[in-house]
Image: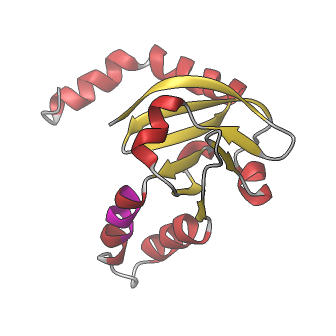
Amino acid sequence: MLIGEYTHTFDTKNRVALPAKFRKEFGKKVIVTKGLDRCLFIYTHKAWEKIVARMSDLSIGQAGTRGFNRFMLSGAVEVEPDSQGRILIPDFLKGFANLGGKVVLAGVNDRVEVWNESEWETYKSNIEQNADQLAEKLGEIGIL
């Protein structure tokens, strides 16, 4: 399970270091793709295969399904961490998530999200302000 929040520096060569706690779980190659809320998602191969299998089961007759498949799959790249655990983020993904300088890597169960630091702080503040309402909704559907 990938959990925790880590702040790292995005270097001038478009690389960011994966936290040591995440490296063991990721292995030799990872998948980086466009995520929701203007962040990037990083998946292990195993988790990515599950996502792709579920997406393959959806009907391509629905425009929303086609669009989301295109969004996730065309924006995905396979990258190999270097000996220091750094991964190269392509320019198109860097631009999509507005990355540079400080970034936050947040473990979210089966993936790591990579955020622009200031956008993460804004997002996190909004979620924290609405945590009670979110918990109420989750309680209504039996999750909490």
Residue at 71% across / 51% down in the picture?
88
Residue located farthest toward the front when viewing the structure as drawn: 83
114 with respect to 143 (left or right): right
Q: Where does residue 127 sit, x and y in percent of width and height?
A: 47, 23
Residue at 38% across / 18% down in the picture?
131
* Residue 128 on the magenta span: no
Residue at 50% across / 55% down in the picture?
28
Task: Tell me the quadrant of the picture where the C terminus can be found.
Answer: top left
95 with respect to 116 (left or right): right
Task: Tell me the quadrant of the picture where the N terminus can be found.
Answer: top left
Figure coloring? secondary structure
For the stretch drawn in magenta, the main secondary structure is helix
Q: Where does residue 110 sit, x and y in percent of width and height?
A: 36, 45
Q: Where does residue 63 sit, x and y in percent of width and height?
A: 47, 77
**Is residue 22 or residue 66 the one in the foreground?**
22
Residue located farthest toward the bottom when viewing the structure as drawn: 61
In the figure, 77 relative to 36: above or below? below
32 with respect to 127 (left or right): right
Q: Quadrant of residue 137?
A: top left
Q: Which residues are magenta?
A: 47-52
**Is residue 83 or residue 68 the one in the foreground?**
83
Residue at 46% across / 70% down in the picture?
64
In the figure, 93 relative to 52: above or below? above
Tally of numbered discs: 0
In the figure, 66 relative to 140: above or below? below
99 with respect to 140 (left or right): right
Q: Where does residue 55 sit, x and y in percent of width and height?
A: 36, 70
**Is residue 91 or residue 17 the one in the foreground?**
17
